[in-house]
Image (cartoon, grey):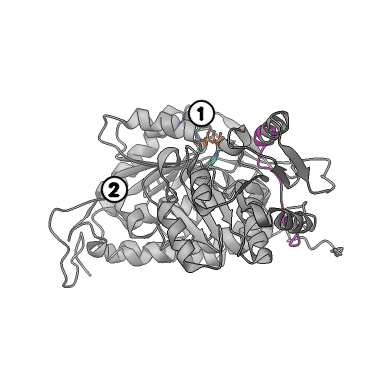
Amino acid sequence: MSFEYAPAPESRAVVDIKPSYGLFVGGEMVDPVDGGSFKTVSPATEEVLAEVAVAGPADVDRAVKAARSAYERTWSTMPPRERGKYLFRIARLVQERARELAVLESLDNGKPIRESRDVDIPLVAAHFFYHAGWADKLAYAGMGPDPRPLGVAAQVIPWNFPLLMLAWKIAPALAAGNTVVLKPAETTPLTALLFAEICGQADLPPGVVNILTGMGETGRALVEHPDVDKVAFTGSTAVGKAIARSVAGTRKKATLELGGKAANVVFDDAPIDQAVEGIVNGIFFNQGHVCCAGSRLLVQESVADALLDSLKRRLATLRMGDPLDKNTDIGAINSAEQLRKIRDLSDVGEAEGAERWSAACDLPSKGFWFPPTLFTGVSQAHRIAREEIFGPVLSVLTFRTPAEAVEKANNTPFGLSAGVWTEKGSRILWMANRLRAGVVWANTFNRFDPTSPFGGYKESGYGREGGRHGLSAYLEASDEQPRTTQPAGRGGAQ
Ligand code: NDP
């Protein structure tokens, strides 16, 4: 039996969306020199939320110059402990303005408020708190006693976790003493622009953080700018490969966090109800717009029917609709373009012979929506088993032995994450040693923590974000071994 829920919408009154936004350069909002503008819409209603500036090449140049000047004059020479104070201040402001940030994120991205409120924004604050603590302890980061920042970082982020990806990029860069120019995704610029306001509120020195909105061309101009020292990108494998080519042979250091096609492997001894929750969280969290989503369910043949029955029953109870309603489980697809891609690949799944099942639900008449869907009878050769759909679509495959599970799980060009469900600890370790994935979750899925490095193998990219490993992507090692006495850190004044 499923319950009817009365609507419980979060108030929009808490956010003040301006009719139009400029670019955040050198500590101020400025009009673009040679760009134009575009409209950002709510994917749940198609309502225009604001007009946002497009940064052209001259704007990119201006922002990189502002970041360079801030790097040389203030940020890299500031005592590390002082840098840390700014990051603590930002973290506290994110917490203070959490409700506003969560509502704005849900409006612009389409994700349910429960996710932005309980997952995204708390993790954003956690990333700034965590990295604030590192700022004066870099001598213990495993990069020698006096690791140096790289300089100006060009950072390009996607639309699935807009503010969280910003935090993943900006917090370690700043803690390590770099300055940044960041480009948010075209469809989700608003929380980055609110973050610009928070930088002002925190009195962050002008030019330490610069935010350029725009399209793919803005991102390309930014990563190709000759005065950039470091490129950090999260997004599609295709764009990641283009960026890898553009930085090859230059002095720029790059980290790329790209797509995934994670296997979520359920053994016959796993507690079924718990596994079902993990599968739902693995692929239907954030409408499946998750690079590490558990989009391939590998279930041991003997329990496949029972598990699928349970899973379908559970999917039928998911509530889809208004992202600002606190009861909503599944929000809107982020854009018309992404919806088209999900529909096209799902149609290919059927055309190639897999069987489609979707939870019965009323889709709102406006906006971009796709019901939770699973495919059975999927074979390894099917495109829905190989390509990233980046939507609420699960491909189900079966296996008989652990060795077959490993072989199927690793049969992908990606290698970002994987999940294992079993009561046997020894089997978890056996599997984790064999799965070619940057993150392996055991009896859980989609868990994130700023202290834990995250990143992939193969076409999922290279470099790690989070933890000590993530910091090293923003530092140049000094040659000596780390000291065991108090760290001096760059700039002294501990
Ligand atoms: P993209 O990789 O195109 O976008 C990611 C970011 O890169 C955006 O800010 C984008 O700007 C920017 N960008 C686009 N082209 C360039 C370029 N040539 N040089 C530098 N930056 C660029 O992803 P899409 O949003 O187009 O999504 C396409 C597919 O990618 C999805 O369907 C999904 O499968 C996958 N994807 C994977 C993600 C992941 O985390 N693994 C995240 C997002 C998408 P703009 O938004 O303005 O185009």
Q: Is residue 450 above or below residue 183?
A: below
Q: Position of residue 488 (x, y in %)?
A: 18, 66
Q: Which mark is residue 461?
A: none
Q: Position of residue 399 (x, y in %)?
A: 59, 49
Q: Is residue 343 left or right of residue 190?
A: right
Q: Which mark is residue 71?
A: 2
Residue drawn at (74%, 45%), measured in percent from left and top? 44
Q: Marks 1 and 2, how far apart in space? A: 25 Å
Residue drawn at (38%, 34%), measured in percent from left and top? 223
Q: Main secondary structure of the magenta part?
A: loop
Q: Nearer the viewer, residue 424 or 63?
A: 424
Task: Say how many tags the image has.
Answer: 2
Q: Secondary structure at mark 1?
A: loop
Q: Outermost residue, left direction?
A: 480
Q: Position of residue 217 (x, y in %)?
A: 48, 28
Membership of 344 in magenta stretch:
no
Magenta segment range? 324-341
Q: Is residue 276 left or right of residue 200?
A: right
Q: Point out the tag, 1 or 2, that comes first from the N-terminus.
A: 1
- Residue receiving disc 1: 35
Q: Nearer the viewer, residue 286 or 154?
A: 286
> Which quadrant would residue 66 be assigned to in this image?
top left
